[in-house]
Image (cartoon, rainbow, N blue to C red):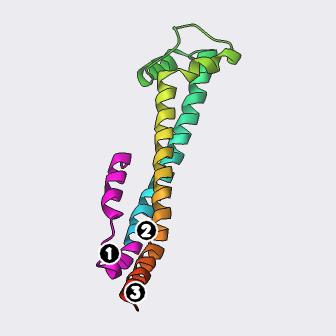
Amino acid sequence: MIELEVILAEWDVDKEMDPTELGEEARKIPRLHSKYLRYLMTEKMFLRQLESVYRRLYIEKQEYYVEGAANKKDYDYQTAKWTTLPEKGKRYVRSTVSQFLDVDVDVDASRLNKETSQIKIEALEMIMKSIMTRGYLVSNQIDWAKWKGGN
């Protein structure tokens, strides 16, 4: 996925308007809309995947903390996949597991990925709102230039 810093750097360039070329600025609006809409939709689809991964990981870890590995094969698989595990053979009461999962390195990393994606979506939605108002800004600048020119 595209990083937030890259999106913001591109927007810093794209947001600039040349007051001497308002016609060209008006023609750029659909291209900008298309570009950032593509980013937004891609990020929203990616967020859905991240949410699914997070939910699945949370449930898998919860079950593992409560019930332990069903067999040696499951234990080896989970040990290779996860960064943190409860002590081998130790089981926790289901009502206390959430406090361990809240600080679990793997669950926290998954949650952080999800929240980072949500922040990118919020930024892209704000950029889209700005692009949608760009036509009014161009129109207002044209009206201002007419008024200043006495027309």
Disc 3 marks a residue whose amino acid type is Lys
Towards the viewer: 144 or 136: 144
Q: Give percent across and percent down for residue 111.
A: 51, 33
The span from disc 2 to disc 1 (Cα, nearest Å) is 20 Å
Return the disc, 2 or 1, that comes first in the chain's sequence: 1
Q: Residue under circle 1?
A: 19
Against 112, residue 127 (above or below) is below
Q: Write the residue at 54% across / 47% down.
A: 48
* Range drawn in magenta: 1-30
Q: Write the residue at 44% across / 73% down.
A: 137
Return the disc, 3 or 2, that comes first in the chain's sequence: 2
Q: Which mark is residue 33?
A: 2
Of circles 1 and 3, the one toward us is 3
Q: Give percent across and percent down for residue 146.
A: 40, 86
Q: Residue under circle 3?
A: 146
Element assignment for label 3: helix
Towards the viewer: 151 or 125: 151
Q: Write the residue at 55% across / 41% down.
A: 51
- Image-quadrant location for residue 25: bottom left
Residue 3 is covered by the magenta coloring: yes
The span from disc 1 to disc 3 (Cα, nearest Å) is 13 Å
Identify the image quadrant of the C terminus. Answer: bottom left
Q: Give percent across and percent down for residue 98.
A: 63, 21
Q: Give percent across and percent down for residue 88.
A: 52, 8
Element assignment for label 1: loop
Disc 1 marks a residue whose amino acid type is Pro
Q: Around disc 3, counting alpha carbons within 10 Å, would you say few (fewer than 14), some (14 to 19), or many (20 or more)? A: few
